[in-house]
Amino acid sequence: MQSAVLAWYDEHGRDLPWRRTRDPYAILVSEFMAQQTQIARVLERYERWLQRWPTADALAAATPAEVLTEWVGLGYNQRALRLRTACVTIARDGWPRDSGALRALPGVGPYTAAAVASFAFGERVAAVDTNVRRVAARLGVAPDALLPAVRHGDWNQAAMELGARVCTARAPRCGACPAAAWCPSHGQVTAQPRAPHASRPRFEDTDRWARGRVIAALAAGEALPAQITRERLARVLATLRRDGLVEQGPSGVGLPGKTH
Ligand code: SF4
């Protein structure tokens, strides 16, 4: 089964830039960006980030305000600060060489640690994201048990790719699946309809949207968005201050270190 999935991945896997490198820093950046952002959006920003800060040392020397400004549009801005803080630790202490030590870095959970360890350092460890967890559950095995003896990093990529593109949550395409011959769930998972949109608030009505608008305005040196009510702005600024994303200066709020 692993051989069939790896052969499928070799032929059909997307050619993503972070799959062509073993540089742990480039892989760490891609994993932070992809944690909560769609791949298409990450692709637009990843190369530019690496050109601006090509190493962990370079990112460690950047200011929090510079990092937040470059991150604008990727969302969940705390990731930018955690990535920078992780690089400060790496610049000081060197790269942790295994997944256990990588997990001590800020913002690096079990999945990200395993991804960097297997893709950059060749450690035989399963990188288990929601896609891999779902594929393994449908195959009826623990994710760790799927890890082959060779090509661990490629296997992790292949399992994620399978979950993202074939064994999807709502409508698995068993007819196109390279693991179908070994899968007890083959043809058994019924397609799930999408939840109706009416039950979800519009993105523009969420505080997450407002937080992103405020950070973008401060990064661009523009006035705070007028369409956000005063009450909502006060609430959002309080959470941004709590998260260290903005600071209060004598004449107003600004990005960290950029208040006046
Ligand atoms: S056969 Fe179907 S359920 Fe099983 S792993 Fe493939 S896509 Fe998923």
Image (spheres, rainbow, N blue to C red):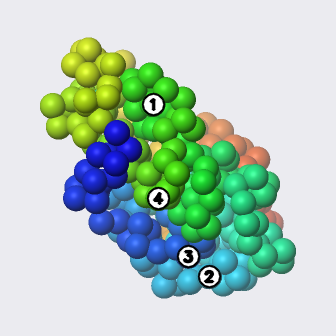
Q: Residue furthest right?
A: 93
- Image height of 164 relative to 196, above or below: below
- Of badges 4 and 3, nearer the viewer stands 4
Residue at mark 1: 136
Instruction: Work out whether mark 2 precedes mark 4 in sequence or the reverse, and give the earlier one.
Output: 2
x, y percent for residue 110: 66, 45
- Of badges 3 and 1, nearer the viewer stands 1
Is 159 left or right of 84, judged from the image as shown? left
Mark linked to residue 151:
4
Q: From the image, which quarter does the C terminus lie in?
A: bottom right
x, y percent for residue 12: 23, 55
Q: CA distance from mark 2 to mark 4?
A: 26 Å
Question: Callout 2: helix, strand or loop?
Answer: loop
Amino acid type of the residue tagged 3 in the rendering:
Asp
Instruction: Work out whether mark 2 precedes mark 3 in sequence or the reverse, and give the earlier one.
Output: 3
Disc 2 beta carbon < 8 A from ligand 1?
Answer: no
Q: CA distance from mark 4 to mark 3?
A: 17 Å
Residue at point 56%, 76% (across, down): 23
Question: Callout 4: helix, strand or loop?
Answer: loop
Amino acid type of the residue tagged 1 in the rendering:
Ala
Q: Which quadrant of the view contains residue 99?
A: bottom right
Residue at mark 3: 23
Residue at mark 2: 55
Q: Nearer the viewer, residue 193 or 157?
A: 157
Instruction: Work out whether mark 1 precedes mark 4 in sequence or the reverse, and give the earlier one.
Output: 1
Is 201 left or right of 91, judged from the image as shown? left
Does the CB distance between marks 4 and 3 fall below 8 Å?
Answer: no
Count of residue discs:
4
Q: From the image, which quarter does the N terminus lie in?
A: top left
Q: CA distance from mark 3 to mark 1?
A: 28 Å
